[in-house]
Image (cartoon, rainbow, N blue to C red):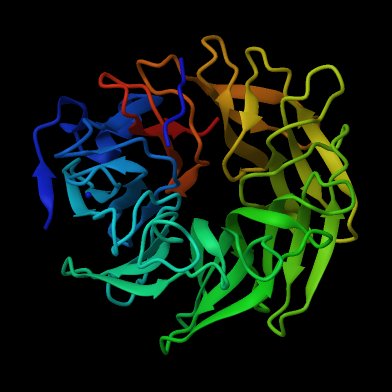
Amino acid sequence: MFSARNLFRTALLGSAIALCAFAAAAQAQPYQILHEFAGPPADGSYPYNNVSFGSDGTLYGTTNLGGANNAGTVFEITQDGTYTVLHSFDGAAGGSDPNAGVTLDPSNGDLYGTTTFAGSGGACRGGCGVFYRLSAGGKFKVLHDFTGDDGRYPAGQLVRDTLGDIYGIATSGGPGEGGAVFEYSANGNFSILHTFSGADGFEPQGSLLLDRAGNLYGATYAGGTDDYGTIFRLKPNGRLKTLYTFTGGNDGGNPTGGLDWGDRGTLYGATNLAGNGSTPNGTVFKLAPDGTLNTLYAFSGGNDGAYPAGNVLFMGGKAYGTTAGGGADEDGVVYAVDPANGNETVVHDFNDTDGAGPQAGLTKYRQHLYGTAASGGSAEFGLVYRVRKE
């Protein structure tokens, strides 16, 4: 069963679950565990976040806790299955508890990310979180300390544009205490693009989505007319438009993950709660460019899953994602929803031994899907997995 719990370069070789190369193992098994976390001090624990890939197929990710200081780690898994802890957060000025994966600069291999807690202080006791860079050579540097006025407790995957500017969200803080969208420019300047105050959304969650025109799209967990969250667009000039406000009814409520593009400007996403008066366990939706939202599927809380928490990934004409609960063992599922008919397929049903309670969504690499389970596995510290798309 899933139970929620709220870092120099240490190699862990010889794992029995990673003896084969990614490609060979992927062909042999529909579901494969790539690494089971062993916990502190040598390894990370409780991965809450999406993974990402370099151009050579190396997988990168973070754990919320574990490592040398039990404050979280950055790790990599190469194509031959070699697992390495790249960095252990110090739990102090260097940050703690990353609730975001890492974003790669393809020009030099540097990794960028945020931690939700610690840093050098500001208005938060123990720190409001940091924005950091981990160079390809292993050098760690805090690029920005959040103070509260400019946001606090950043989370969600960062997004990088073609010019090298990086964008992200802070889940709270700012003048209205509702969170913020920030930018770290390629020339090293940090700025706040928008702060939320309630009517325009409150507590942004998940990763941002960037279009070719430089517009940013995202979701807030709360706020809006009915306080069940919003979907928004933020233009390069800083003007925010609320594209949809959730009611907490059949349309769902409280989205926690990021969005993805479908055909012709359609956005796909999921809500963590609501969706059906008798079984309010979350939804999968699509939002048309004209602002019309269609609920594609409402989770029952049974074998089909419950409480989707991560991003939705649209590929091959279907919306893929994970739920933190539900399934045959109530440990969550990987699902696929067909927008054409609203049918849901359970792609994988977690059973604790092979992972439990995924809080992150899925990442596509070649023809397979990759993700993390927040707990479960042999040590109950979570794991990294790969699953075939349906």
| 139 displayed left or right of 234 | left
**Identity of the residue furthest to the top in this view:** 328
Residue 261 horizontal/vertical position (percent): 67, 56
Q: Nearer the viewer, residue 264 or 27?
A: 264
Please name the residue shown 77% across and 41% down the image.
285
Q: Nearer the viewer, residue 164 or 62?
A: 62
Q: Nearer the viewer, residue 111 or 362?
A: 111
Quadrant of the frame with the C terminus: top right
Where 78 falls versus 141 (above or below)? above
Residue 261 appears anywhere in the view: no
Residue 41 horizontal/vertical position (percent): 16, 39
Q: Nearer the viewer, residue 307 or 170?
A: 170
Q: Splitting the image into 4 quarters, where does residue 132 fall?
A: bottom left
Please name the residue shown 63% across and 67% down the image.
180
Where 224 falls versus 107 (above or below)? above
| 389 displayed left or right of 57 | right
Residue 77 horizontal/vertical position (percent): 24, 46
Residue 268 appears anywhere in the view: yes
Please name the residue shown 49% across and 70% down the image.
147
> Total number of numbered labels?
0
| 99 displayed left or right of 378 | right
| 32 displayed left or right of 3 | left
Please name the residue shown 19% across and 70% down the image.
139
